[in-house]
Image (cartoon, helix red, strand yellow):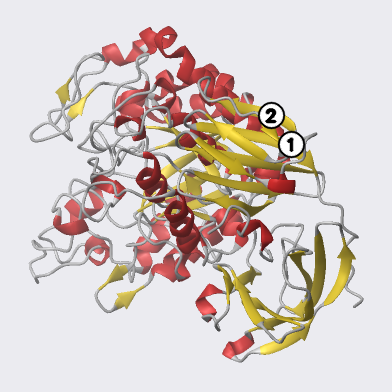
Amino acid sequence: MTDLELASLPHHDGSPLYVSTQEPVLGGVVALRLRVPRSFPALRTVRVRSNPDREPSYTDAHVVHEAPDAVWWQAEVVVENPVHGYRWLLEDFESDTWWLTSRGVSTIETRDIDDFRLVTFDPAPGWARGSVLYQVFPDRFARSAAADGREAPEWALPASWGDPVIHEGPGTGTQLYGGDLDGVREHLDHLVDLGVDVLYLTPVFPATSNHRYDAQSFDHVDPLLGGDEALVRLVEAAHERGIRVIGDLTTNHSGDAHEWFRAAYGNPGAPESEFYLWLDEQQTDYVSWLGHRSLPKFNWKSTELRQRFIEGPDSVVARFLKPPFSFDGWRIDVANMTGRYRDEDLNEEVRRTIRRTMVEVNPDTLLLGESTNDASGGDFLGDAWHGAMTYANFTRPLWNWLSVPGSPAGGGLGMTLGRTSDYTGREFYAAHREFAAAFPWRTRLHTMNTLDTHDTPRFVTSAREGTLPVAAGLAMTMPGIAVVWAGDEFGLTAADGEEARTPIPWDRVGEHADTIGLYRRLIALRRAHPAIAEGGIRWIHVSDEAVAFVREAAAERVLVLATRTLTSVDLGTELPDDAELLLAENADAPVPWAEGRVSTAGPAFAAWRIPGVELPPFSLAG
């Protein structure tokens, strides 16, 4: 692929420049626009192929705007299904034809699964677009003075804050540092200083492990974390600072010490018996998460389970969204596995029920589902989950491009062979586009861009030298919710997900001022430019050592360049001489440019502001 090949291709995405409404309705008319660069062959025919009821139909497009750099076409379609797929068909004056789908331009006919998508489901809350989410693992974030007075439970292996993390063998899940919710509250100013506006807490319910994904109850907050009152104090303090808070709920399984499971285990007559998937009549053998008997799997055919857990104003889902707790949303653990077992698939029913309950209590709430591998299938079309916590479309491609080849990359990251590959920038782009293609645009904007999480090794552990600004910069500027896993801004390292749950070194903040400053600057860039939050993304350069794209909106555009080594990139007219340099990260890699050519002395991340896209207002009169 040559330097300017991408910039010369027709482009369309779901952003406001290209689609007349972000909230289409069934039966409504939506105008769609296509940008065709002047360097592309002149077109005599442009049509939109829709696929209502799985039967193709075509709509002719017409030219609505001619600019020096591109010709803009527009077509109007009637939204005929809740998920309305469409693609573009282009023909030049030599009768050569192209298809344009979410995967890009093709000279052969494309698949329905690759179509762009309009969706009529209720949108995510407006505050979630462009948000920066900070993930906290409560036991390891901060410990308040009150924690000293709490006695460790029998299952726990108490640890001092500076002790090494046990991440293999006995003690891995039971080592307890005593971090609590008041400790989180006492450090909210750190989040404010970074520019974070969403706090995501991993589970806060009582359990028999430090990770708490093996809940004993969903009725109250773990006393080891300070109990219900501590959660109320934390959420109130966060809200006062303009930070929303989402919780973590496991709908696939409970712990084997859960009150529901204990009531049903060996007791077929218990009402809770129908809550789980039993393998014998005595109810002593059961289905569990990946064979871990401490995590028995829920049976979502149970009406009573739904009423207690996810359905209606008295359910667990509802209770923690209402005052006094007032969560602003949920992240659902292993959402992809929920309700699925052999020939049963109740996932759609469960996720839609969860969202319906949330809307009834507070529609201004966010619902994210964990699906660590390919999340681009039918689960994430917008009927419930607003976005995915996934690794396939961003995290794994990024690691494979910016990590030392062959580095260990096990755990929840999901690398096929447990190690990184040696991707070029072209392969990073191709992998990202492949796994993001099937998401509707709204889902892409709310899917989490994570360098790492509590389930993965830390990115910087195996990163190529100097590439942290590149990786973090891409997380902040590509479509999606930008994520900071607590400790990333301290430059913490870890070989696996368990070791990644390192206590935050609050006594050494000064030692990490440079990395904290990097995150502060990158987050500020994101927060200052709406084009990064909501604008479209048009890729303009892909090579082995560099990628570049433009986040586009009517008011402004932000051009982003990311390189992993010394290189020179020709961005042509996409980078005019009067572009405003917003940020250039890596002191050893300056980014001067002339006539669109940028040279870097090593890994670099840079962003420029250029004028927005001037187009006539959408009109539905052809």
Reading the image, the residue beneath label 2 is 582
Give whichever of 461, 182 is nearer the camera: 461
Local SS, label 1: strand
**Image quarter for residue 247?**
top left
Q: How many marks?
A: 2
Residue 352 shows up from this direction: yes
Observer-nearest residue: 620 or 183?
A: 620
Instruction: Depth check: give the residue in front, 15 or 197.
Output: 15
- 513, above or below 452, in the image: above
Please give the name of the residue rendered at 29% of the width and 37% of the height, measured from the top-left corner: 457
Q: In this view, does 32 lie above or below 553?
A: below
Type of amino acid at the residue the image marks with label 2:
Leu
Residue 322: x and y in percent read: 55, 43
User: Could you say where residue 547 lies in the image, as x and y percent from the top left?
Assistant: 54, 46
Tell which circle, 1 or 2, labels the residue nearer the N-terminal end.
2
* Residue 156 as seen in the image, left or right of residue 501: left
State which quadrant residue 205 falls in: top left
Outermost residue to the bottom: 55
Q: Can residue 311 be seen in this view?
A: no
Residue at point 30%, 41% (across, down): 455
User: Does residue 63 appear left or right of residue 593 in this picture?
Assistant: right
| Residue appearing at x 27%, y 63% in the figure | 275
* Cα distance between the residues tagged 1 and 2: 6 Å
Q: Where is residue 310 in the image (x, y as percent from the top left)?
A: 44, 57
Of the residues shown, which amino acid type is indicated by label 1? Arg
1 and 2 marks in contact (CB < 8 Å): yes
Task: In the rendered structure, find residue 609 and report the number of the disc placed on it.
Answer: 1
Give percent across and percent down for residue 587.
53, 19
Classify mark 2: helix, strand or loop: strand
Mark 2: few, some, or many residues within 10 Å (few <14, many ≥20)? few
- In percent of the image, x 92 and y 76: which residue is there? 621
